[in-house]
Image (cartoon, helix red, strand yellow):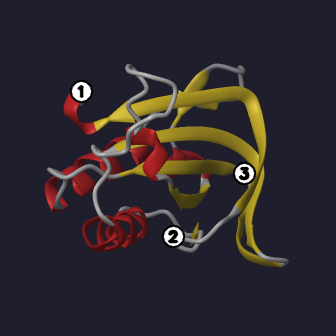
Amino acid sequence: MRAVLQRVRHGNVTVGDQVVGQIGPGYVILLGVTHSDGPAEVKKLAEKTVHLRVFEDAQGKMNLSALDTNAEMLVISQFTLYADARKGRRPSFTDAALPAVAEPLVAHFAAELQKLGIKKVAAGVFGAHMIVHIENDGPVTIILDTKEL
């Protein structure tokens, strides 16, 4: 699994003209799933996400985790994180898991964040054309890949 964590002041996602998920301070998480991912990768990535210390303490140092700050999280499925653009001009997405595999793992990831103590977890609509509004705070953007954790 790959995740792009963006520390935000707030974020929301719309499908059509309807807001389907929104959060205050926390992370907007762009989440990609590959063929070999399963529950073990979900657990590993969720634990890293909630415990990663990139929120500022009273001295302005990135020393606090999402749990320490009551951060909220917005999970957006994004198969394009597994794009391979090494050849030609059109990326290949063959490394991205098929929807039948990816959709339940994305839902499981969001549920795991809640299980680990994140009080508000919102999500986009899997497979829909979404507009994601992100007010990046810092900016702070962290890329996580379970193959490297």
Chain-order first, disc 2 or disc 1: 2
Q: Is residue 82 left or right of residue 38?
A: right
The residue drawn where x is 46% and y is 30% is: 143
User: In the image, what residue type sits under mark 3?
Assistant: Pro
- Mark nearest the camera among 3 and 1 is 1
Give SS at disc 2: loop
Q: Specify few, some or many for label 3: CA neighbours under 10 Å numbering under 14, 14-19, or 20 or more.
A: many
Chain-order first, disc 3 or disc 2: 3
- Mark nearest the camera among 2 and 1 is 2
**Residue placed under numbered mark 3 in the picture:** 25
Give SS at disc 3: loop
Q: Specify few, some or many for label 2: CA neighbours under 10 Å numbering under 14, 14-19, or 20 or more.
A: few
Using the image, tell me which numbered label, if any, was put on residue 126.
none
- Mark nearest the camera among 3 and 2 is 2
Q: Where is residue 63, by image quadrant?
A: top right
User: In the image, what residue type sits under mark 1?
Assistant: Glu
**Residue placed under numbered mark 2 in the picture:** 127
**Residue placed under numbered mark 1 in the picture:** 148
